[in-house]
Each structure stands twice: as C-alpha cells, then as structure tokens.
Amino acid sequence: MDLPAWAWALTMVVLASVVVLDLAMAVRNPHKLSTKESAAWAGVYIGAALVFGVIMFVTQGAQYGGQFYAGYLTELALSVDNLFVFLLIIQGFRVPAVLQSRVLLVGIVLSIILRGGFIAVGSVLIAKFSWVFLIFGAILIWTAIGQLRENAHENEEDGEEQYEKSRFMKFAESKLRVSADYHGSKLFARIDGVKFVTPLLLAMIAIGSTDILFALDSIPAIFGLTQEPYLVFTATIFALMGLRQLYFLLAAMLKSLKFLHLGLAAILGWIGVKLVMNGLAENQLPFINGGHHIEWMPHIPTTISLGIIAGVLATVVLANWILLRRQGKSFKELFAESEASLDNAPAVAVAEK
C-alpha cells in the first residue's frame, strides 16, 4: 500500500477523536452500561469497522480489504478472550459498578498506546530482518499450546475462577499505602492526614500491566496476516474501540464460551505456522538451508486465512449455541443475566471528600 501522508493523518485524527470522546463520556457520566446501550454502541463500532473494510476493498483492492478483515476478526477474537481477564480483575478488586466503565476505558487506552509502540517496532524489524517471522511464529504456536492447556484446565475445574495477582501487583501493594475502601472516582485519598492510593488506581494498574502480556500474542498474530503498518494499526484499533461496550454486553457470556480457547488455539496455531512458512520462504539465516530462501515453501493467500478464521469463529459460536440449547438456555437469557452479574461489586464505600 502506498498511502499519502494525509490519509495517515486523517485516520489518526478520526480514531483519536473517537477514543477521546469515549473517554470524555466515561469520565463525565460514569455509570454501568445497560445491555441495550452496550449492544447499540458495540453495533456502531463493529459497523464502522465493516464500513472501513469496504473502503479498503474499493480504494486498495480485494487483497488489502481481505487482510483488514482477517486482522480485525483475529484481534476482535483475542480481545474478547482478554475481556475474561478484565472481568476477573474487576471482580478481584471488587470495583463498584459505577466505576467499571472508567477502569475498562483506561485499560483500553493503555492497550492502544502499547500496541502502537509494538506495531512501530514490529514494522521496522520485519522490514529489516526476515527471521522475525520465525520468532513471531514460534510465539503464536506456543500461545496456541497455552490456550489448549488453559481450556483443559478449565474443564477440570468446576469452581469459579479467581483473579491471581501478578508479582508486579503484589510488589505494588507492598510498597504503596492502599485504602481499604473506594473513595468515589478518586485515585488518591487523604485519611487522617495520610495520603493513600485507592483500590481504583490498583485496578487500573492491574489491567494496564496485563495489556503488555496481551500484546505479545496480539501483535505477532496481526503481522502474520498483513505486513502493512496501516492495516495492522487500523485493524488493531478498531478491535479495541468497542471493547468497553462488549464487556458489559458479554459479561455473563464470557464464562459460557466454553470453546473460545479451542478456537483461538486453532487460529493462533494456523497463523503461527503461516509465519514460520513465510520466514522459511524468505530465509536469510546461515544455519538454515545454507542461508538461502526455501523456494518450495507455499504462499498462503489471504482469502484462505480469512476463510479459516471466519470458519473457526462461526464454529465456536455454533458449538456454544448448541451447548446452551442442551442446557435449556439461550443467548438472550445470558444477555439478561449480564446486567445482574456486574452488580456483584459493592457500592462506593466512602463518599468523595
């Protein structure tokens, strides 16, 4: 793709404006989004991504349009999986329902910043060193294996999962004075003349720190589908933009998506193998094939990758629908349960002072 500077600038301005507007709405009117409101906004963001893909098809051709859709679907699937971790963090810190939207949005903004940096670095590395494909491919294959293990572990446990604090969070809590209660939307509070950080700040730090781990599989996955920085950036941002609304929409369903890890394992494993094949086809490492390209390595068209990704996700949804039907439930009932599931956290214990 050979896009003029104004196209990049316009895209950055529009996407940044959307993120800033979303942030302003969350700060000025903090509240728990209803299922109806969440569905409406999630539909707007998904619709915007679909329209953008059509624009890519029309202006840049089917190849790049297909790459955008493949990247967007993959990033969206990974983002939904990440929402489950967000849910555990929010429940672990017992974030009041009225503040959950703000915590999520801060996490998403941090995701955008971190991924922007990873995309910039990844683009430079891929352009200069073909062996990066092999590293990215190995990361995705290892992540796919981890998804399979996680799925097997979940099947063995019938109890509700709990959020396990990382070493970083345990270190932060050991070094900071943390108030026992929330103080409205404040990140810091002064109690009896002593300054404390509130649990709200720790919840934001927890979500922000996990974003670094999420990017380790997210960015290699998108680069496995397209090496165009513009498509990598836009597909990633579009997948993140509606994440806050999807959280409130899918909160109850996250625990019922029994086959999501299997689907993600299949997608990441496929992209990982594809990256390894690309790396071998452009091989420059002296200890592999004498440093020569492996000419017989096949090239996988984007249409095949898009079909596999869409097929796997459709299979996951269908399999979960069949499972729910056998249990006498429906997606509609789960959507209704999502409203109540987010009210487990207590109300703000201490009013703002």
Image (spheres, grey):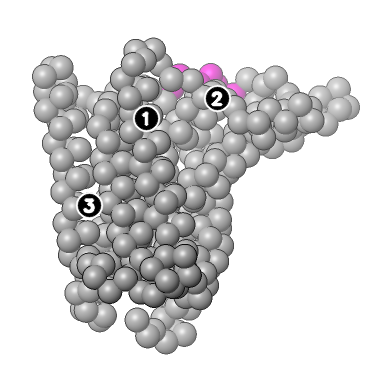
In the picture provided, is 177 more to the left or to the right than 339? right
Q: Nearer the viewer, mark 3 or mark 1?
A: 1
Residue at image x 37%, y 30%? 149
Res 82 → quadrant: top left
The three-letter amino acid code for the residue at tag 2 is Glu
The three-letter amino acid code for the residue at tag 3 is Ile
Please name the predominant secondary structure of the magenta segment in the image: loop
In the picture provided, is 25 more to the left or to the right than 289? right
Instruction: State the extent of the magenta-drawn residues as a range.
Output: 343-348
Q: Position of residue 240 (x, y in %)?
A: 41, 52
Kindly identify which residue carries mark 3: 309
Residue 51 in sight = no
Q: Position of residue 239 (x, y in %)?
A: 37, 54
Residue at image x 18%, y 38%? 317
Taking the magenta stretch, the answer to whether it contains residue 52 is no
Q: Which mark is residue 105?
A: none
Q: Secondary structure at mark 2?
A: loop
Report if the CB atoms under discs 3 and 2 are less than 8 Å apart: no
The three-letter amino acid code for the residue at tag 1 is Arg
Res 278 → quadrant: bottom left
Q: Position of residue 38 (x, y in %)?
A: 33, 41
How many numbered circles does the render carry?
3
Q: Looking at the rendering, in which quadrant would you find the C terminus?
A: top right
Q: Position of residue 215 (x, y in %)?
A: 49, 51
